[in-house]
C-alpha cells in the first residue's frame, strides 16, 4: 500500500505529536480507511519529509507522532518564476497545478491590457488562497516537499519594476528566437506569459525594455494554459532535472 502524503502548516520535529485538521482526519478515516498504528508521510512545505504514525483517529480528529525525518530532496536546481496573466475559469487552476508538478519555484498572477478577469478585494484574496491550496495539493501528489509561493496579484508594470535578476523570457509567437538560443548563467529564470488574448505589442516591447528576451516555442500558437507548461518542460529538460 502506498503511504499517504499530507501537508500540514505546523512545525515538524521527531517525537512530536501533531494534531491534523478535520479534512485530513476525514480523508484518512473515511476515504483511506486507515487505523491507529498505520504510517503516513507529512511535509510542511519548507523542505523535508517525515514519517509519522497514527496514534488516534476519528472522523473529525487525527493525532500522529513524528517517527523519522526522511532525506528526500526532489527540488530542481533551476529556480523558475512563472509570471502568468490571470485567465478565466479553470485555466488558471490548471496552470498552477501543472506548473507545481513541473517544479516551478514561485508564481505571480498579473493583470495586463487584455486580461478578461476582474478581481479585487476579498474576491482576489479568496482566489489567491484557492490557488495556494491547489499548489499544496499538487505537492502532496507529486512528492514535492517545498510548496511554490503564490505571490500577490499585481499589474504587469509592477511586476516588471521588481527588477529580478537571472534569465528573463517572455513568450511571443511572432519572433524567430528560440529558448535554445539563450544562455542560462545562474539557474534563475523568469517566464512571462500573457492571458487568453496574449500580451499586446506594447507590453512585449515594455518587457524587452526590462531585459526580457522574447522567444517562441515553435511554429504553432499555444493557449495560455499550454504555453507556460511547454516552456517549463523545455527549461527543465535543458537545464533542470527532467530529460
Image (spheres, grey):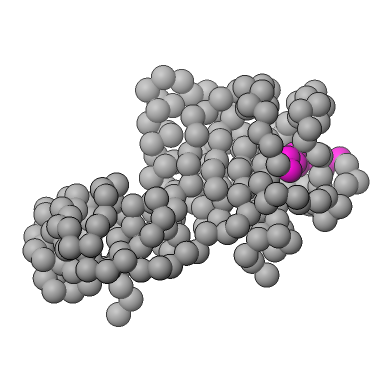
Residue 11, position as x, y percentages in the image: 27, 50
In the image, which residues are magenta?
Answer: 167-174
- Image quadrant where one finds the C terminus: bottom right
Q: Is residue 227 visible?
A: no
Which of the pair 149/164 is nearer the observer? 164
Residue 35 vertical position relative to residue 83 in the rendered view, above or below: below
Residue 63, position as x, y percentages in the image: 13, 59
- Residue 202 falls left or right of residue 34: right
View extreme (bottom): residue:
1
Report the predominant secondary structure element of the magenta stretch: strand
Name the quadrant containing residue 13. Answer: bottom left
Residue 23 vertical position relative to residue 118 in the rendered view, above or below: below
- Residue 65 falls left or right of residue 92: left
Which of the pair 199/66 is nearer the observer? 66
Residue 120, position as x, y percentages in the image: 46, 20
- Residue 176 falls left or right of residue 96: right
Q: Residue at x 64, y 66 (%)?
A: 242
Magenta stretch encompasses residue 170:
yes
Residue 163, position as x, y percentages in the image: 67, 28
- Image quadrant where one finds the N terminus: bottom left
View extreme (right): residue:
176
Amino acid at each position: 500500500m502506498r503511504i499517504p502524503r499530507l501537508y500540514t502548516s505546523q512545525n515538524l520535529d521527531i517525537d512530536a505529536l501533531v494534531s491534523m485538521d478535520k479534512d485530513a482526519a476525514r480523508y484518512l478515516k473515511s476515504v483511506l480507511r486507515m487505523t491507529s498504528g498505520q504510517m503516513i508521510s507529512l511535509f510542511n512545505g519548507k523542505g523535508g519529509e517525515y514519517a509519522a504514525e497514527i496514534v488516534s483517529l476519528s472522523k473529525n480528529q487525527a493525532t500522529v507522532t513524528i517517527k523519522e525525518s526522511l532525506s528526500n530532496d526532489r527540488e530542481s536546481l533551476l529556480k523558475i518564476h512563472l509570471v502568468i496573466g490571470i485567465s478565466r475559469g479553470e485555466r488558471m487552476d490548471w496552470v498552477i497545478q501543472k506548473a507545481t508538478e513541473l517544479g516551478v519555484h514561485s508564481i505571480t498572477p498579473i493583470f495586463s491590457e487584455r486580461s478578461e478577469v476582474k478581481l479585487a478585494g476579498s474576491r482576489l484574496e479568496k482566489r489567491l488562497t484557492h490557488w495556494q491550496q491547489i499548489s499544496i495539493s499538487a505537492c502532496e501528489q507529486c512528492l514535492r516537499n517545498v510548496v511554490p509561493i503564490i505571490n500577490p496579484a499585481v499589474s504587469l508594470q509592477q511586476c516588471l519594476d521588481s527588477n529580478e535578476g537571472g534569465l528573463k523570457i517572455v513568450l511571443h509567437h511572432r519572433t524567430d528566437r528560440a529558448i535554445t538560443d539563450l544562455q542560462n548563467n545562474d539557474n534563475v529564470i523568469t517566464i512571462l506569459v500573457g492571458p487568453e488574448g496574449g500580451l499586446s505589442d506594447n507590453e512585449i516591447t515594455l518587457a524587452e525594455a526590462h531585459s526580457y528576451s522574447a522567444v517562441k516555442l515553435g511554429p504553432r500558437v499555444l493557449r495560455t494554459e499550454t504555453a507556460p507548461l511547454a516552456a517549463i518542460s523545455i527549461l527543465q529538460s535543458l537545464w533542470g532535472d527532467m530529460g
